[in-house]
Amino acid sequence: MNSIIETNQVTKEFVTKRGFLKRTTSTTRALDQVNVTINENEIFGLIGESGSGKTTLGLAILRLIDLNQGKINFFGENIYDLKKRQLFNFREKTQMIFQDPYSSLNPVVTIYKSVSTPLKVFHKEMSEEQVVDKVIQTLETVGLTPADQFLNKFPTQMSGGQRQRVGIARAVISDPDFIVADEPVSMLDVSLRADILNILVNLKLKLNKSMMFISHDITVTQYVSDRIAVMHLGQIVEMGESGEIIKNPLHPYTKTLIDSIPVPDPNKKWNTDEIGGQISEYTNEGKNECSYANKCPFVKNVCRERRPDFKEVEKNHFVACVLYD
Amino acid sequence: MMSFPLLEVKDISVEYGVDGKTIKAVSHVNLEINKGDIVAIVGESGSGKSTLAMTFLNLIEKPGRIRNGKVNYRGAKGVVDVLRMRPVDLMRYRWKEVSMIFQSAMNSLNPVMRIEDQLKDVMIEHGTVESAVDAKIDEKLKLAGLTTSVKKSYPHELSGGMKQRVNIALALACDPKLLIADEATTALDVVVQRQILTRLLKLKQDLSLSLVFITHDISLVANIAEIINVMYAGKIVERASAKQLFGNPLHPYTEALLNSIPTLEKGTAIKGIKGTPPDLSKEIKGCPFADRCPKMYDRCLAESPELKNVGDNHYVSCHLY
């Protein structure tokens, strides 16, 4: 399988200024030496708690932010080296689906205009009729049928699920190779999620798209993804085939995540053990220790002395934890 | 069940008047909450679950209005209708008898007040003596699973999970008998969600609280709630114990809702529910779920089904039964 995205030691720091005359600064590492490879025709799931850097990685892969360190290859070419013209082509071939369908669509612009804009930017040669045809065809792909009834609607006339479909249509209309879907169903009701997830899976199966699916919900992620990476405070702590991650989680953090999923079965007792570690705000300050050491129930001295290596423990199953040294 | 209900909602209807239209958010709902019960109200956004919960505290404000019905609360002085309480009694009832954890942890705290001052405010206002306040603040923070050092913080210094715990501490400030958690964990990630729920269950045991869980995520309440109410378009369409509801869902909406949950078992395809909920500003003649229902027949369009007991305290409003 060919890789479409390859990140190499990607690091991004955010500096916050505080105090009198903003002289106190503190640095947070949102991404800390991240190496991931996303293959062609694959949905790559990225999970982690809020603040773990998932969205930052998504933005970095689309070159929507600048990096402090590292490089990201798209079909073997470092996207941070692209010049104007090449960058324009890269923008056509990569797209994003946003979290909030209520704020990601311009409320005073019709659905037709929203969805057709990418074509007007990237395919100036297309005639108006061709654009209309393509918009209708794309709206139908995402299940907005009959499509011609939606063209002149405004976002406020549509439900959340319909709006998110518009968001997907807008992302796929320029026929991108790679899409970042950032929490695409977290704002939707459970009953509406299923259809959106099925649309995303079909983009891969029928249109051969590759995707990074970002979510804090591991159940939803495993439903769509081929492989899953688990992020914690800017670091990838585990990565593997999604079935394998669910059945055989190795990293203590992944285990806690999976243990915390509510099971829709009244016969299973709720796990009432208190989870080790107090909740508090930890941030990654780039210290030379395991990012999970402060919360881990299995923490040892060595965890605070060095970073665990990210290594292949079983075939295609990577973990960064000293327990598997 | 011989015990008298702690809170009894009788035939309640709530409307919102918006842009000259009347939206019937809740219509003719009956509900009982017994002492020590954990009751869940599950439904999609716009199904009226939060509006229903607001009536428990008589919190409906313009443009909303309570059309008819009663909310009977069994307090120390016998049964009173919350909707007809004098303002001074209402103030004693809210927080002290029934309190609520609101949906967004991020927005329901005052950003310019220290945590201790917010707790103090509530306690003093509702009759705690000044000298006892400090000890009580510490006690409530500990109950909510927080260290007492949090009290000097401002809300922006705390994480989402910690803020939600402060909300729990606030809700417990005046030792209520009934606690309503309105989407209390929706904005949080799974690990924090589990911590918060575990804490609430422990409180229920230790303080013999009654709990009402309001959520759109039915899988969340499967192993917590004793009784689950499924709401759709302002009505309760099914009520049963968690075991009955998951083992033998009767209403086609409940069934569809259960089929739409992704589970960790690979290979089980999930299905969404076709269509959208009905426009509640229009008169619905038949069953509100009729146009999305795979089992719809003539009668469903003509006549609205009643919520009835089909045996074993399993209630459903569907013409199939």
Image: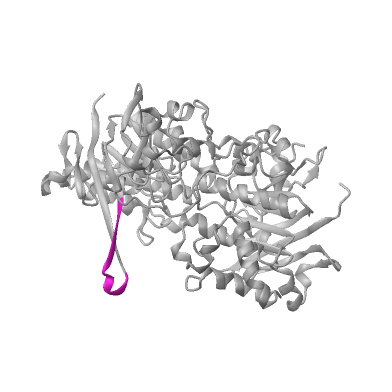
Quadrant containing the C terminus of chain B is top right
The residue shown at (77%, 77%) is B86
| Rendering coords of residue A254 (x, y %) | 45, 36
Task: Give whichever of A143, A167 is nearer the camera.
Answer: A167
In the rendered structure, which segment of residues is drawn in magenta?
A19-29
Note whether residue B297 is visible: yes
Task: Give whichever of A264, B255 is nearer the camera.
Answer: A264
| Rendering coords of residue A6 (x, y %) | 23, 35
| Res. A37 image quadrant | top left
| Rendering coords of residue B80 (x, y %) | 82, 67
Task: Give whichever of B17, B153 is nearer the camera.
Answer: B153
Note whether residue B125 is visible: no
Residue sitting at the far right: B2
| Rendering coords of residue A152 (x, y %) | 38, 54
The tally of labels here is 0
Residue sitting at the far top: A315
Q: How is the image coloured?
A: one colour
> Does B146 appear in magenta?
no
Q: Is residue B317 left or right of residue B269?
A: right
- In the rendered view, tell whether residue A311 sits above or below residue A79: above
Q: Is residue B274 left or right of residue A164?
A: right
Task: Give whichever of A295, B120 is nearer the camera.
Answer: A295
